[in-house]
Image (cartoon, helix red, strand yellow):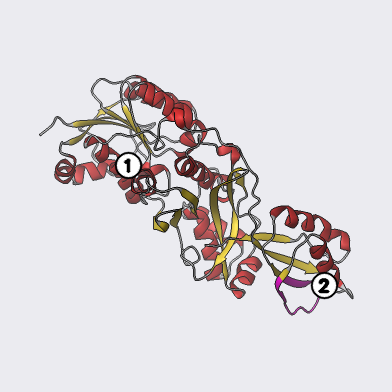
Amino acid sequence: MSAPLRLGIAGLGTVGIGVVKIIQQHADLLSARSGRPVTITAVSARDRMKNRDADLSGYTWVEDPVELATRDDIDIYVELIGGDNGVARESVELALKSGKDVVTANKALLAMHGQELAALAEENGQVIRFEAAVAGGIPVIKAMTESLAGNHITRVMGVMNGTCNYILTRMESAGLPYEAVFEEARQLGYLEADPTLDVGGIDASHKLAILSSIAFGTQVSFDGVEIEGIERVSIDDIRRAADMGYRIKLLGVAQMTGRGLEQRMSPCLVPADSPLGQLQGGTNMVVVEGDSVGQIVLRGAGAGEGPTASAVMSDIVELARGVRMPVFGQPAGRLKKPVHARTAVPAAYYLRLALLDKPGALAKVATVLGDAGISIHRMRQYDHQDGPAPVLIVTHKTTPDAIDHAIAELPKTGVIAEDPVELRIEEV
């Protein structure tokens, strides 16, 4: 049997300890599947005294991850620190320069510096693997770089943040407002230290930018993602969408058009009976569409110790087997700098309006929409006793520019009591 594959693990949080446990519990299985033993040489974390529910006594403790990344007695540097700069970036760069392969779960690092790191890896003859960076335990990176390599990818979309999906599905099932479920998620530990990373759509957008690079052969471009979080989605929107056969999801969509690369992360309506519409709780789902394969749906746990550590181990085993490939599926020098395109693909839209009880109010709304070239597909008005009348409109397909124009003009009618809410309806 070949010599052991030696790991240095930086970061002993939930995922890092999950990796340690897998290696300790499945040593024989990993050796059989890899063709060589997989061992841990050294580890690093901020607090050595913390109780981590794992026996670390057999590993060298290194205070500085940068020192760990350059040790002669490790073959793979496993970066599970997180963050797009600082010690995570510095240690990964030094590991590559020191002749180490890198396995990471750090989507922020790859979304912000993926092109530079890919070039650095190739320059030094090394490999970066990152299955755990997108959608937790779902093997979407492997699927796109290997299994779907013979396809021209036409669209990638999905629910890529389990916390947001938990909040939206919990709002619907419990009939609770956003603020109440947000606090519940915080108490359960589902939210990042900075909650905006989750509910603001940033975490999911990091993942979308990575998938776009693989799908369309472009340099990773997080700056090109149009981002809107779920903060403005109300319980009324959840209920009204359900009444009309839809559910609301924080949906990432990327597609290459004649104008350039569209990347958007925003709350959208999807058919309730679609795979995305049926996705509950903290589960993730990625949908990939290719010219030969058609539509592929990948569903599974998007976070947590076991699923994410499983994804890390998949990369480690592949490297142990000698499988090596460019970081984003093709050499970094071949990745094109994308032309960013604002979303222009037509779609139907959901509009929620609060109208003052005035004669001709609906007619004025219809006139504004008509002047913008927007046709009404369905309209529903709900009973009300006092105050503004809630009205829902589902449009026929129209452009984002037309919707933006109409939303800007509606308050000028004098019959709108509150800011209109518009949500795109995505065909899945």
Specify which label sits upstream in the sequence, 2 or 1: 1
> Measured along the vertical axis of the image, is residue 106 above or below residue 164?
above
Residue bearing the label numbered 2? 362
- The image quadrant that residue 19 belongs to is top left
Q: Amino acid at mark 1?
A: Val
Q: Residue visible at 84% across and 70% down? A: 356
- Label 2 vs label 1, nearer the camera: 2
Residue bearing the label numbered 1? 312
Q: Secondary structure at mark 2?
A: helix
Q: Give the CA separation, mark 2 to mark 1.
A: 55 Å
Residue 161 position, x and y percent, is 49, 52
- The image quadrant that residue 313 belongs to is top left
Q: Which residues are magenta?
A: 377-392
Say which of 44 and 234 sits in front.
234
Confirm whether residue 376 shows in the render. Answer: yes
Residue 347 position, x and y percent, is 64, 60
